[in-house]
Image (cartoon, rainbow, N blue to C red):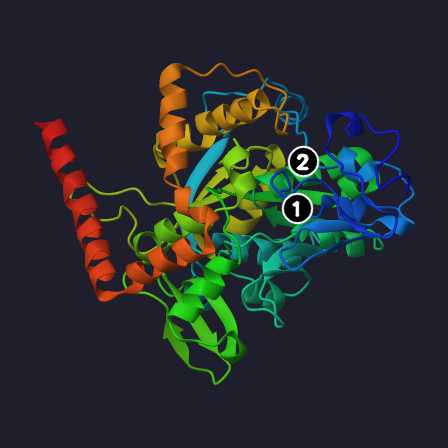
Amino acid sequence: MNNGTLRGTSYLERGFIHPAPDSAELPVIPKDLCTRCGACHVICPTNVITFDDHEFPVIHSQNCIDCGLCLKVCPGIEFDLNKHHQKMFGIDYPMGRMEGVVRQAYVGYTKRPDIHHAAASGGVVTQLLIALVNTGIVDAAVVVGHNPDDPSLPMPAVARTEQEIIDAAQSKYVPVANLRVLRELRKTKEKFAFIGVPCQIHGLRKLEDLNKQLGRRAYLTLGLVCHGVMEKESVLDVLDLNGISIDSVRQVHQRDGHFPTQMRAHMKDKSIQNLHKFEFKDGMYNTLFRLYRTERCHLCPDYSAEMSDIIFADVWLRQPNGDYLYPRGVTLVACRTERGEQAVKTLVESGEVELEPVDFSLVTRAFKNKYHESRVYPFVEIAHRQKQGRLAPDFGVNVNSTLTDRIQAGLFRATFLFSKSPRLRKLILRFTLSPPGQLLTLAKMKYKKYSYALKTKLKRA
């Protein structure tokens, strides 16, 4: 390693790598830019990139050969939305469309009670992966399961059997470098399906550009709608405030039970403990989101995994009376590519799911309330960082924000004020879990339901 830098890369002049002694472990890029996708680990020809206890990649610099591939593949530095959108769909990136390209959309659920119970909503993702493996369309699926050594941190895995796929069911909200298992798959000739959040799919698309053989074997990409992930301290603090030692926990399920689910600890003594009252979204997620959301998530404009073949999302829409539109729990499925449509056809032919075609307007409704938070504010944040001379990702699109956008983005960012202080965020979380905090949560849930019903009634009047 030459002065701890990477020679011959266009990123060096932009300051993405900091000098370090030859013997040091060197962050691949600054942590506030890293998506923790794991693509750098896969592309490294000398296998000198490992991960710390928060899944940030580090280079063992004394053995680095300065090839620069880790920077070329990194979606945290750069991901050209126009280039990749043109490559996949033949059109420029649609800035005004949160849902991206959609050929056909469905809502539905698995018919298998065991999978529906294990899933966060409709279980369609799990059922699709099983259908793809059982029919031989793919040999394996890259999934995220539970880590037997650290219940606070998920673990990526290659699933080749039905049971391995079921074991990895449910949503996980802690960042994990799930692309890293592709290093194992590189040694085989297996075709695989990959499931991940938008930034991980960005990393996969860049990997495909640099490793054509791997790209040909990435048969299908399943995208999960993502509003942001949270540091693993979100799990550790919830356990601690419930008086639970992590040493007594086998697994933490952030979306457990029937929709709309709860966060629960599955103990080593086989008991199950609820970690909060009420449903997960209003009872826990919205608080954890404000306190533990990762810094890099504030810079991501891709909410709906627009570079995937199929996207999957929960449906939180409401009926006119304020109740959930699909109280049983369903999965919204939107096909972006012909290959995605063929995969869904295979799933339907398996007879294991109930899928109902829906109008595109439902997809738009499901996503539109996140437009400013996930499409406008990230570019305001990026422009602000650039103006301050700080490093920021390049998405290859020009976005002009208005004064109103900048004011609203500033107010939104202010709601994350306490996320910088471990002591303050734990104090707020303690209040949320206390009886007064639970009463406040219940009041908010009732208000959301009845205010929606009232607004609907007034619109119809």
Q: CA distance from mark 1 to mark 2?
A: 8 Å
Q: Secondary structure at mark 1?
A: loop
Residue 166 makes an appearance in the image:
yes
For image coordinates 41% across by 15% down, the residue present is: 402
On the image, the x and y values in percent for residue 380 come to 48, 24
Task: Using residue 447 as the reference point, say whether residue 375 is left or right of it.
Answer: right
On the image, the x and y values in percent for residue 457 come to 11, 34
Residue under numbered circle 2: 75
Contact check, label 1 and label 2, Cβ < 8 Å:
yes
Could you classify mark 2 by the number of other residues whose Cα lies within 10 Å: few (under 14), some (14-19), or many (20 or more)? many
Q: Secondary structure at mark 2?
A: loop
Residue 350 makes an appearance in the image:
no
Task: Using residue 69 as the reference point, say whether residue 113 is left or right of it.
Answer: left
Instruction: Give the mark nearest the N terminus, 1 or 2.
Output: 1
In this view of the protein, which residue sits in the foreground, 67 or 436? 436
In this view of the protein, which residue sits in the foreground, 23 or 241? 23
For image coordinates 67% across by 22% down, the residue present is: 83
In terms of image quadrants, where is residue 199? top right
| Extreme residue in the bottom direction | 269
Quarter of the C terminus within the rendering: top left
In this view of the protein, which residue sits in the foreground, 444 or 259? 444
For image coordinates 46% across by 75% down, the residue present is: 266
On the image, the x and y values in percent for residue 63 come to 91, 50
Callout 2 amino acid: Pro
Callout 1 amino acid: Cys
On the image, the x and y values in percent for residue 459 come to 14, 27
Residue under numbered circle 1: 37
Task: Using residue 80 as the reference point, say whether residue 102 is left or right of it.
Answer: left
Quarter of the N terminus within the rendering: top right
Q: Is residue 293 above or below residue 136?
A: above
| Extreme residue in the left direction | 461
Could you classify mark 1 by the number of other residues whose Cα lies within 10 Å: few (under 14), some (14-19), or many (20 or more)? many
